[in-house]
Image: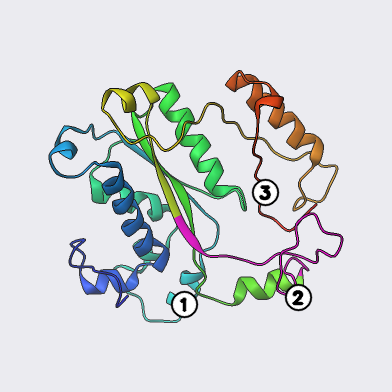
């Protein structure tokens, strides 16, 4: 709380201290992303207000902390995950869809996929999308350790026979999304282009927490078809983040 400039964001100290740290950091990061993209000052006055906001978030640790304190007028707004996206849209005055998405480890990418589809369908003209993961309670660590997810050696060892689980990480990250044609017309600093995006769900041939390779192959092929590219044109592949095969 002490590191959050609540006055800059026009929030009272009582409201700010009730906010989940995820929400405080997310507001800072969204502001910085828009600033980096050039949408402040004179250019921001020309921006449409139909931004969509899609935030991936899984844990709600701060609720456990806040529930130990007397009720306040701001506790619900500060600890409900729906307001991670809702408060961003409200602060910036956006009128597009505002969703907080929880699909476990894939939440951030599913948020980006959902944002892309909303832009492609005309539901919004541009969007903020990404995710947040901040730990403020040992509760989830204890449960994940009991279930055997976490590495007892404290090391992630992908593609290694000695792999014994994964290590959790914290962070907040978002991207500013808009159609490529609009970005080029407005002379934006284009960092990357999403040419295809899709999501699916595992079959029931493996445990619910374990990715199914057949389902992943189906999705890869679908995305390739949507993007109109051949598999051999892909030069870099990033593995998923769970500690599973």
- Which numbered disc flags the more N-terminal residue, 2 or 1? 1
In the rendered structure, the answer to whether residue 140 lies left or right of residue 75 reads right
Mark 3, Cα crowd under 10 Å, few <14 / some 14-19 / many 20+, is few
Q: Where does residue 48 sit, x and y in percent of width and height?
A: 23, 31
212 sits to left or right of 97: right
Residue 15 visible within the image: yes
Residue under numbered circle 2: 153
Neighbourhood count class around disc 2 (C-alpha, 10 Å): few under 14, some 14–19, many 20 upward: few
Quadrant of the rendered image containing residue 141: bottom right
- Residue 166 is one of the magenta-drawn residues: yes
Give the SS element for disc 2. Answer: loop
**Vertical relation: 56 (above or below) 191:** below
The quarter of the displayed image where residue 22 is located: bottom left
**Mark 1 Cα-neighbour bin, 10 Å: few <14, some 14–19, many ≥20:** few
Question: Can you give x and y, in whole percent of width and height, for residue 130 in the image?
Answer: 46, 47
Range of the magenta residues? 147-172
User: Based on the displayed image, in which of its 4 quarters is residue 54 positioned?
Assistant: top left
Check if mark 3's residue and mark 2's residue have beta carbons within 8 Å. Answer: no
Answer left or right for 159 relative to 80: right
Which callout, 3 or 2, points at the residue further toward the start of the chain? 2
Residue drawn at (32%, 75%) of the image: 1
Residue at the disc numbered 3: 240
Q: Is mark 3 on a helix, strand or loop?
A: loop
The vertical placement of 175 against 20, above or below, is: above
To which residue does mark 1 refer?
65
**Which is more toward the observer, 98 or 163?**
163
In front: mark 3 or mark 1? 3
Q: Residue at x 70, y 38 (%)?
A: 201
Residue 97 appears in the picture as rendered:
no
């Amino acid at each position: 709380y002490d590191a959050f400039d609540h006055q800059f964001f026009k929030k009272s100290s009582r409201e700010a201290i009730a906010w989940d740290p995820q929400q405080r950091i997310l507001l800072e990061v969204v502001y910085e992303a828009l600033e980096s993209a050039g949408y402040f000052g004179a250019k921001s006055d020309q921006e449409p207000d139909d931004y969509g906001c899609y935030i991936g978030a899984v844990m709600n640790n701060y609720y456990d902390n806040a529930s130990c304190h007397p009720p306040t007028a701001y506790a619900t707004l500060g600890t409900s995950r729906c307001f991670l996206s809702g408060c961003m849209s409200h602060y910036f005055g956006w009128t597009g869809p505002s969703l907080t998405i929880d699909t476990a480890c894939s939440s951030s990418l599913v948020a980006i996929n959902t944002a892309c589809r909303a832009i492609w369908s005309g539901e919004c003209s541009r969007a903020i999308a990404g995710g947040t993961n901040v730990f403020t309670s040992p509760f989830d660590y204890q449960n994940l350790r009991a279930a055997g997810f976490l590495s007892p050696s404290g090391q992630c060892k992908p593609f290694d026979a000695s792999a014994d689980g994964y290590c959790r990480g914290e962070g907040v990250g978002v991207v500013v999304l808009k159609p490529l044609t609009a970005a080029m017309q407005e002379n934006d600093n284009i960092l990357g282009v999403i040419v295809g995006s899709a999501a699916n769900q595992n079959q029931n041939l493996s445990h619910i927490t374990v990715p199914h390779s057949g389902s992943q192959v189906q999705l890869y092929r679908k995305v390739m078809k949507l993007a109109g590219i051949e598999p051999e044109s892909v030069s870099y592949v990033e593995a998923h983040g769970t500690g599973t095969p």
